Image (tube, grey):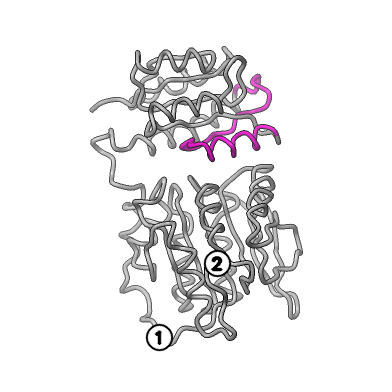
């Protein structure tokens, strides 16, 4: 079975050695080269023929963004995982990288002297992402990272749908790998008079989620916020769970508010989609619409099960348009989805479902 060939690009000798040391301990990965900056990396790619590149964001001579742009011109399908510091600047540049075609990202300690923390992050985050983005090279890899979970749930486990659809009062969205760009594409198609609140979990660390909310707000469709404790959940507004905190919704008299907490991760995630969807099912029941977009793993599967048990509606992104068909794939294979659609058609589908039963009718998608 062929090994996954990785080229490491980072200007720091300490980081190159750390990444190489961790990756080379994995029997399925081979480090075929390293480069101290983007120019050297571009020269090495045809020489070492990597299956994937790890690319530092901040480098002299030619930084990660410039390097990524050049890689995409010549190698449009070569997976590239950005490796950036957990800082406001690192978050901004990483989101720029995702916009310009990066496959994924991993954060590293701002202080490269944090060897233990760096090794743990590489083992828990980078290696699984490398294997996911290169799974087609492995003979033992399934078509997606969801099939091991699907057998636990079958369509027969859930009650049949009622003929009538209940009016939808909240939209809940969960996503992970590939999510920032998927959310941007989705909300470009939303009308400005969207009549219900939106709550979102995007797997990201602190600082990243605040910046993502700002960028999505700039699209001008709905008002975006990084959610705050006790914040009212209002129609026409979208609330993103802060990195590092779970988000639930709760009733406070006649109002619905955001409740944030730091209970243990679920599905190795905090925020977790399951935590949010569970609360949505409890508060809104059949008046909920759950949407699961591209993402690695199975987060959202149990939450969709609870939504389905409440007769709520569920829409997921299809495999062809997903960066990773893990999260939506789990839901689809378990028979929990009302619709499985390409990303570019999901906004219209959401608006149609929300519009059903509402008068006056919601305006058409832009």
Question: Of the numbered discs in the image, which one, if any, rests on residue 162?
Answer: 1
Q: Bounds of the magenta span?
A: 89-115
Depth check: 335 or 79 in front?
A: 79
Q: In which quarter of the image is the N terminus?
A: top left
Q: How many labels does the image show?
A: 2
Measuring 25% from the left and 38% from the top, which residue is drawn there?
140
- Counting residues from the start of the chain, the first of labels 2 and 1 encountered is 1
Q: Where does residue 253 sit, x and y in percent of width and height?
A: 75, 79
Residue drawn at 28 percent across, 33 percent down? 137
Q: Give the image location of residue 317, x and y in percent.
A: 41, 58
Whether residue 112 is in magenta: the answer is yes
Q: Residues within 10 Å of mark 2 (few under 14, many from 20)?
A: many
Could you tell me residue 266's position as x and y percent? Answer: 54, 53
Left or right of 87 in this view: 140:
left
* Circle 2: element type: helix
Badge 1: few (under 14), some or many (20 or more) residues near its Cα, within 10 Å? few
Residue 256 location, x and y as percent?
Answer: 70, 73
Task: Name the residue beneath numbered marker 2.
Answer: 278
Image position of 354 with respect to 35: above or below: below
* Residue 19 vertical placement versus 122 (above, below): above
Answer with the quarter of the image where residue 261 lies. Answer: bottom right
Q: Residue at x 50, y 36 (%)?
A: 125
CA distance separating discs 2 and 1: 21 Å
213 vs 116: above or below: below
Answer left or right for 185 relative to 144: right
Element type at mark 1: loop
């Amino acid at each position: 079975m062929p090994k996954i060939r990785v080229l490491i690009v980072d200007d720091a000798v300490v980081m190159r050695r750390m990444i190489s040391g961790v990756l080379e301990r994995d029997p399925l990965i081979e480090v075929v080269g390293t480069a101290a900056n983007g120019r050297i990396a571009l020269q090495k790619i045809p020489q070492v023929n990597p299956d994937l590149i790890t690319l530092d964001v901040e480098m002299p001579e030619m930084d990660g963004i410039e390097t990524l742009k050049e890689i995409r011109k010549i190698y449009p399908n070569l997976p590239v995982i950005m490796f950036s510091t957990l800082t406001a600047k690192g978050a901004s540049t990483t989101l720029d990288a995702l916009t310009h075609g990066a496959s994924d990202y991993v954060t590293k300690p701002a202080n490269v002297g944090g060897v233990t923390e760096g090794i743990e992050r590489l083992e828990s985050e980078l290696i699984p992402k490398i294997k996911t983005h290169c799974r087609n090279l492995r003979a033992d890899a399934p078509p997606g990272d969801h099939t091991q979970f699907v057998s636990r749930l079958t369509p027969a486990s859930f009650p049949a749908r009622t003929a009538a659809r209940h009016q939808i009062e909240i939209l809940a969205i969960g996503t992970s790998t590939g999510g920032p760009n998927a959310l941007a594409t989705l909300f470009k198609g939303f009308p400005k008079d969207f009549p219900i609140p939106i709550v979102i979990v995007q797997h990201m660390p602190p600082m990243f989620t605040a910046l993502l909310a700002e960028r999505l707000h700039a699209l001008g469709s709905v008002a975006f916020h990084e959610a705050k404790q006790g914040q009212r959940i209002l129609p026409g507004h979208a609330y993103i769970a802060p990195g590092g905190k779970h988000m639930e919704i709760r009733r406070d008299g006649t109002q619905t508010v955001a409740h944030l907490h730091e209970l243990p991760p679920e599905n190795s995630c905090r925020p977790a989609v399951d935590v949010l969807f569970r609360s949505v099912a409890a508060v809104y029941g059949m008046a909920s619409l759950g949407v699961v977009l591209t993402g690695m793993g199975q987060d959202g599967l149990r939450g969709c099960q609870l939504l389905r048990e409440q007769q709520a509606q569920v829409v997921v992104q299809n495999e062809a348009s997903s960066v990773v068909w893990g999260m939506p794939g789990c839901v689809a294979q378990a028979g929990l989805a009302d619709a499985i659609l390409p990303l570019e058609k999901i906004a219209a589908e959401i608006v149609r479902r929300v519009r059903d039963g509402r008068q006056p009718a919601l305006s058409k998608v832009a």
